[in-house]
Amino acid sequence: MSDLRTAVRDAAARLAAAGVPSPEVDAVALAAHALRTGPAQVRRAMVLGAPEPDGFAALVAEREARVPLQHLTGLAHFRRLSLAVGPGVFVPRPETEVTAGWAIEAASVRGLDVVVLDLCTGSGAIALAVKDEVPHARVLAVELSDLAHGWAVANRDRLGLDVEIRLGDATTAFADLEGRADVVVSNPPYIPVGAVPVDPEVRDHDPEIALYGGSADGLAVPLAVASRAAALLRPGGVLVMEHADSQGEVLPNALRTTGEWSTVVDHRDLSGRPRTTVAVRRPARQP
């Protein structure tokens, strides 16, 4: 068994050779998990010549096989939260933090009785982030997969955030709240059917129900969710929807053609790619 510094250096080299996008960061994160400490403490221990921790080599081997880092550590960091994740639930990505930010901004300017709905909540990431950062909001979420629903409920209970999480179909959810929501946010499945993700972490480990948008352009599910959002929102309410970077024009254009939205604006993520559409609900047409 080598010292920690050598073990982390060798692990980073192996992960890089395996195509892992952030090999050094992941190697340190795995060492931190094995030592039950944080990355900063690992880097300090590397300088001090600490020994390689038990179980580190096995974790590195799994990451080398492209098992998601979050599945190995059991946690995904999202804005100010640490979420439990694993098999059966989509691992939230950094770009979705930006989507959550638009929902948080929309909710924060509403009154104390603001109602926020998260459709296709997955691990609960967006809904929980909204409640964490806009504590006065009433936040509810829905998830179709019973496995993902279980992860979301567990995250809510562990974090102690008052979010109602329902099991059900986002396209029919919240019949009791039609016309009453101020903000509806969604990161729906949007990958075009037949377009296989390149990254093994996504292709082999994220659940298909959270990935594929139900049509060749990937928009069948997002547009069905947006239609439900239109029914749930009060006039002037805001829809915030994440999409693939290739859908930055087609999704906003599709929303405009429905006549349900007064303004539709697309926003880029931190890498400059089209990522999030924000639309304002038009008042219902008078008969």
Image: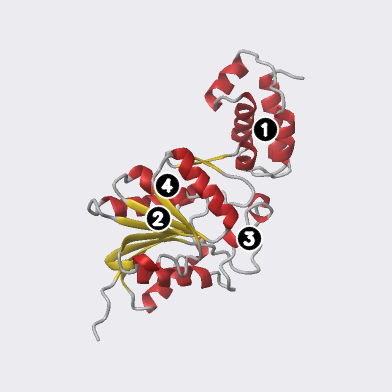
Lower sequence index among marks 4 and 1: 1
Lower sequence index among marks 1 and 3: 1
Real-space Cα separation, disc 2 to disc 1, in angstroms:
41 Å
* Count of numbered marks: 4
Q: For the residue marked with disc 2, what is the amino acid? A: Leu
**Percent of width and height locating residue 64:** 72, 40
Residue found at the very far bottom of the displayed protein = 287
| Quadrant in the picture for residue 216 | bottom right
Q: Secondary structure at mark 1?
A: helix
Camera-side residue of 56 and 118: 118
Badges 2 and 1: C-beta atoms under 8 Å apart? Answer: no
Lower sequence index among marks 2 and 4: 4
Comparing labels 2 and 1, the label whose residue is closer to the camera: 2
Badges 4 and 1: C-beta atoms under 8 Å apart? Answer: no
Tell me: 12 left or right of 188.
right
**Percent of width and height locating residue 62:** 72, 39
Q: Which mark is residue 12?
A: 1
For disc 2, the marked residue is 140
Seen at 57% across and 64% down, the residue is 191
Real-space Cα separation, disc 4 to disc 1, in angstroms:
33 Å
Q: Secondary structure at mark 3?
A: helix
Q: For the residue marked with disc 1, what is the amino acid? A: Ala
Real-space Cα separation, disc 2 to disc 4, in angstroms:
9 Å
Real-space Cα separation, disc 2 to disc 3, in angstroms:
24 Å
Q: Which mark is residue 128?
A: 4
